[in-house]
Amino acid sequence: MTFCVFFVKKCYLCGRNTENRMMEQLLKNLNDRQQEAVQATEGRVRIIAGAGSGKTRVIAHRYAYLVNVLGVDPGNILCMTFTNKAAQEMKQRISRLIDPGYINDYVCTIHGFCVKFLRKEIHRLGFPKTFTILDDDDKKAMVKRVMEAMGIDRKQSTVKKHLDIIGRTKGALRTDYVGSLMLPNSTEKPTAEHLFFYNYVQEQLRLFAVDFDDLVYFTLYILHHFSEVREKWQSELNYLQIDEVQDCDADEWELFTILSGGLGNLCVVGDPDQAIYEWRGSKPQLFVDFESDTDIILNQNYRSTPDILDVANAIIDHNRDRVPKELFTQRPKAVRVVHYHAENDVEECKWISETIAKAVKKGKGAYGEIAILFRAAYLSRGVEQEFIKNGIPYSVWGGIRFFERKEIKDALSYLRLIANPNDDLAFLRVCNVPSRKFGKKSLEWLAMLAANADTPASLYEALLASISMPELRRTKMAEFVRVIEDGRALIAKGCGIGSTLDQVLTNSGLKDEYRNDEDEERLENITELLHSIKDYEDSHRLGDEVATLDDYLQDIALYTNADYRSDDDSVRLMTIHQAKGLEFPYVFVMGLNEGIFPSHRAIRERLKPAEEEERRLMYVAVTRAERELILTESEGFSAANQCGKYPSRFLMEIPSDLVEVKGRMRPYLYEETQNMVNYLNEELGIEGTVYYKEEPKKEADDGEIRAGDIVEHPVFGRGLVDKVKENGSCEVEFTSGRRTLLPRVLTKVG
Ligand code: ATP
Ligand code: MG
C-alpha cells in the first residue's frame, strides 16, 4: 500500500502542487520497479536484487520521497547499512536529493546507530555517557592483561582463543550477560568455564568500556528491559530501511524488529549473492525467510557493461546454494574483460602500474576512477611499491599502507639496528617489541648512560656496554642484545638479508608472539616482506656480487619514507570486503590465484560453504566495475600458502569468449589448477567441480615481437617488451634496467 498525502501547497506559477512536482522530479530517474519500491513506504517491504540494480539508489530516493513528498521529519527515519564507506556513500546520495540541513544523523551503520542510542540511554545501566568503545587492538590488549592476571601461559593458550571465548560467550548468552555480569551492581557469580569471561567483563566494567558486540547487546538489553525507552524509540522511528541486509546477524535482525515495532514500517534491501560475512555469523537466510507485505525484485543492472555482467553471472552461476536471478543491462557493449597473466608477481604489479600510467597519460581515465581490489591485505605490497616508484598517487581504503603497518616497521627497524647500532630511532622502536619489561624509567637511565659515556654513545651501544649491570637484571635486554649481535654476525658471515631477518624475528620472539596471538594478518604481512626481500636479493645478484644490507635499507627507504600524495585523485586500493556497495569506472582484481582467492584457508575451515562464500566475494569484486574490468594473476611461489601459484578456479569459470587473455598463458596452468582443486576436495572430502576450460587461444605466432611479450637476451636475461618503436627496435624492461635493442638479439619465450 502506498500513501501520497497532504498535497496542499500550490506552485504560484503553474498551479500544480509542489509535492506532485517533487514526486515527478524524484521518480523520473527510476524505472517502474524502482518507482514502485520508492513508493511502497508502509508495512514490511523486501527489495531483492542483484548487484548494481539500484538498491542503494532506491533507498536514497525512498528517503527523499518520505521527506520531500510525504513530509516525514528526517528524525523519524532510520536508514542503516553495513560499512562506514557505504554509509558515507548513502549520505551523499541522499543529500543530493533533499534540502540541505534536512539530513539527520540516523543515516549510519548499525553500530553507529547503537552508539547514538547508547550515548542517550546507557545511563540507565549505570554507565556514563562517555563510555569507551574498544576496538580490536584494545580488546586484544585487555585479553592479554586478563590472561596475565589469571596466570594463563600464552604459550599454552593463545590470545586469539581467548578472544574467541569472549565473542562466543557473548554470542551464546546474548543479552543475558549484560544484566548478570556487566552492570555495575551485578552480583551473579560465574560458572567455572565463565571465569575468564567474568574477569574480562569486570575489566570492561572497571573502564566503563564496551566492545562492538556489546554495542548491539546493550542496546537490545535496554530495549528489552525498559519499556518506556522502547516505546519512545518505537514512536520516534516511524520508518526503518536497511541496506545490505544479507550480511546482518540474528541480533541485528532482532534490533530491526524491535525498533520497527511502532508503525511496523521496515524495508529490508539486499542480495543473497553478495552475502560475504557468514564466517562472522551473518544469516542471509533470515532475509530469504522474511515475511513481507510487499516484495520487489529489481533486475536491471545500471552499473556495468554487458561484458562485465556476463562474467559476473557466469561465475555466480557455479554456486549451487542460490536462487537464480536474471540480471540484464541495456548499456552498450564495450571493451572485453581482460585476464592478464604474468610470469611472477613483480611483473603482475609492474603491468598494473604501467597500464594505469599509460591510460591516465592518454586521458582515458583519472587515477581517482580506478580501484585495485584484492582478497587479503598483504597483497597490496607489490602494487604499492610500483606505484611509489612510478609516482602514481594511491590511497589504501579501510587499511594502512604496507610499509606503515606496525609489524613491517618493527621488522625493518630490527634490520636498521643490525646495520647501524647508532640508529636510536630504530632502537626505541624495537627494544620493547615484544615486551622486555624495559620501561620509561629504564630508558631514561640508559639515555643518561649514553650521554655520560666517555665518547657519547648511542642507546644501543650504551646498552651493550652495560649489559651486565644489576639495573638490567630483571629485564630481558640481554636477550635483545643477543638477537641483534647474532643478526650482525649472520650478516658479517654473508648470510642473506631475508634469512637473517627471518632468524632475527624468530629469535626475538616476535614470530612466536604473532603465532600465539594467531594474528594471521601480521604473519601474512611478515611472510610477504620476507618474500619481497628474497626477490630483491635475487634480482640484485650479479655473478658473485650480492646486495648488502645497506643497499637494501637505502633502496627500501624510498618506500618507507615516500612522500605520499593522497587526494581524491588517487588510485584506491582495498580488500574486496571494503569495496562492498561501492563502484568504480575501472577495476583491477589482482592476485587471482588458486589458494589466495579462493582462500584455501577459508575452505579448509568451513569446507563447501566457504567455497561458495568465496565465489560470492568474487561476484562482489567483479560487479564493482562500471566500464572496464581487469583480472590479474601470476605464476611463481606463494609464500603465504607455501605452494606454487596457478590461476584461480574462478578464472576457469569464465567462458573463454568473454575474456581477452593477455600475457603468456600456458594451457597446462589450468590443468594444474584443476589438480589443486581436486586434491583439496579429496583431502577435505568435499564434492568438487570438474571444469572445462578451452585452451587459451594461441596468438598466431608469426615470430614477430610485440609489446607485452617476454623475451630472452643472451646477456641481460629475461625481460618484458614494453614498446616496439616505429623503426622496429624494442624497449625492454630487464631486472637490471630498461634497454632499447634490435629484435634480432631477442628470443621470444613461452
Ligand atoms: P550493490 O549491489 O553493488 O550495492 P546496488 O543495487 O545498490 O548495487 P546502486 O549502487 O544503487 O546499485 O546502483 C548502481 C549504479 O546504477 C549507480 O551508479 C546508480 O546511480 C545507477 N542507477 C541505478 N538505477 C538507475 C536508473 N534507474 N537510472 C540511471 N542510473 C541508475
Ligand atoms: Mg548498494
Image: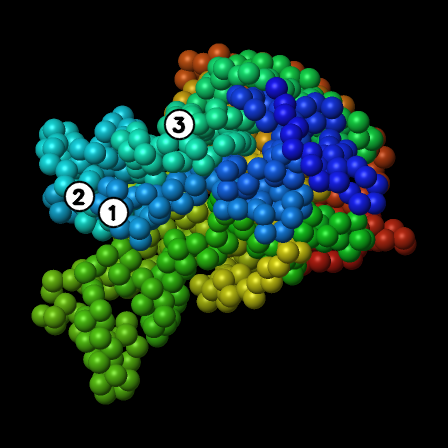
x, y (%) of residue 744? 82, 48
Is disc 1 in contact with disc 2, using a CB cutoff of under 8 Å?
yes
- Classify mark 2: helix, strand or loop: loop
At x 27% / y 38%, what residue is drawn? Answer: 163
Q: Residues within 10 Å of mark 3 (few under 14, many from 20)?
A: some
Q: CA distance from mark 3 to mark 2?
A: 26 Å
Which quadrant of the rendered structure holds the N terminus? top right
Residue ID for mark 3:
258
Looking at the image, is mark 3 or mark 2 nearer the viewer? Answer: 3
Q: Residues within 10 Å of mark 2 (few under 14, many from 20)?
A: some
Q: Amino acid at mark 1?
A: Phe
Q: CA distance from mark 3 to mark 1?
A: 23 Å
Residue ID for mark 1:
127
User: Disc 1 beta carbon < 8 A from ligand 2?
Assistant: no
Q: Residues within 10 Å of mark 1 (few under 14, many from 20)?
A: some
Residue ID for mark 2:
184
